[in-house]
Image: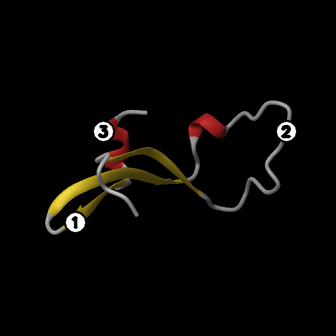
Amino acid sequence: MTIEFIEEKNGSFVIEDDGMIVGYFAFLPSPEPTYAKIYEGDWLDDEEPYHVVHRIASYPDVHG
């Protein structure tokens, strides 16, 4: 999954502290192509919408 794809889905989010970006994550709505085929299991309900969190990053000194 590319950054461009995430941007197209408006899924990029930053976390700020006093105006400084200290973290980033991608939060994307379904469907998630990676989850189209699940091995050795099934979704409980694959018709309901869901979201997926990708690419979590933060400065090591930032907590909470």
Q: Position of residue 37 (x, y in %)?
A: 72, 33
Q: Quick check: marks 1 and 3 in contact, CB under 8 Å?
A: no
SS under mark 3: helix
Q: For mark 2, what is the residue?
A: 41
SS under mark 2: loop
Residue closer to the observer: 8 or 62: 62
Q: Position of residue 11 (x, y in %)?
A: 38, 54
First of labels 1, 3 by sequence position: 3
Q: Quick check: marks 2 and 1 in contact, CB under 8 Å?
A: no
Type of residue at label 1? Answer: Asp
| Separation of marks 2 and 1 at Cα, in angstroms | 41 Å
Look at 30% across and 53% down and name the residue there.
23
From this view, report whether residue 50 is shown above or below residue 6: below
Q: Quick check: marks 2 and 3 in contact, CB under 8 Å?
A: no
Residue 58's disc number: none
Question: Which mark is nearer the camera, 1 or 3?
Answer: 1
Q: Quadrant of the C terminus?
A: bottom left
Residue 4's disc number: 3
SS under mark 1: strand
Q: Quadrant of residue 27?
A: bottom left
